[in-house]
């Protein structure tokens, strides 16, 4: 998750946000950058929590509740992968299709791990 968060640094250049967001109002352009930063920060902190408190996530009541919340987060992200983005964005495009599949698998993995963690006994 921490690596995933760090990848967000490349988003503006990879997706040419300077050009793509040029026609947006100042507030919308800044929201793109600021929301991306905070999403990356939250994902980084999720990873740091898993690294530093894995035992607590599995073996405490609060940890299992946090794991349930993380399951809901990643489960929602998995659903959005299929119903929030148009298949036009990846279908018939080799690189984009590979990324769609890899990220679908990653969101599935995160969802499954946290689902199992919140019901560990």
Image (cartoon, helix red, strand yellow):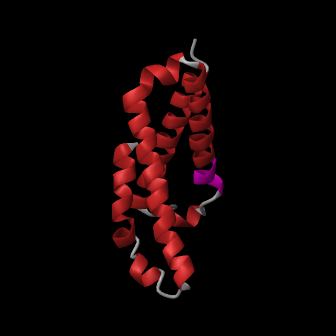
> In this picture, is 45 found above or below 49?
below
Q: Residue furthest right?
A: 83
- Which range of residues does the magenta coloring cover? 79-83
Which of the two residues, 71 or 79, is positioned nearer the viewer here? 71
Magenta span dominant secondary structure: helix
Spot occupied by residue 49 in the image (x, y as percentages of width and height): 43, 34
The residue shown at (51%, 42%) is: 107
Q: How many marks?
A: 0
Q: What x and y, as percent, mark residue 14?
A: 36, 69
Residue 40 in percent (x, y) is at 44, 54
Taking the image as shown, residue 120 lies to the left or right of residue 55, namely right
Indicate whether 39 appears above or below 78. Answer: below
**Residue shown at 53%/71% (left/top)?**
31
Residue 7 falls left or right of residue 59: left
36 magenta-colored: no
Give the quarter of the image for residue 7.
bottom left
Question: As rendered, which of 104 and 8 lies closer to the eye?
Answer: 8
Q: Residue furthest bottom?
A: 23
- State the image quarter where residue 78 is shown: top right
State which quarter of the image contains the C terminus: top right
Q: Residue at x 41, y 39 (%)?
A: 47
**Residue 64 vs residue 112, the one in the foreground:** 64
Left/right of residue 21 with respect to residue 80 in the rendered view: left
Q: Residue at x 52, y 65 (%)?
A: 89
Which quadrant of the figure contains the N terminus? Answer: top left
């Amino acid at each position: 998750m921490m690596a995933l968060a760090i990848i967000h640094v490349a988003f503006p250049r990879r997706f040419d946000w300077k050009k793509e967001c040029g026609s947006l109002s100042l507030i919308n352009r800044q929201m793109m950058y600021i929301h991306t930063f905070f999403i990356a920060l939250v994902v980084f902190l999720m990873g740091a929590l898993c690294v530093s408190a894995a035992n607590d996530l599995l073996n405490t009541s609060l940890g299992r509740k946090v794991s349930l919340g993380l399951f809901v987060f990643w489960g929602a992200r998995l659903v959005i992968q299929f119903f929030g983005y148009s298949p036009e964005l990846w279908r018939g495009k080799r690189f984009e299709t590979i990324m769609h599949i890899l990220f679908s698998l990653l969101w599935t993995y995160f969802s499954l791990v946290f689902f199992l963690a919140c019901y560990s006994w």
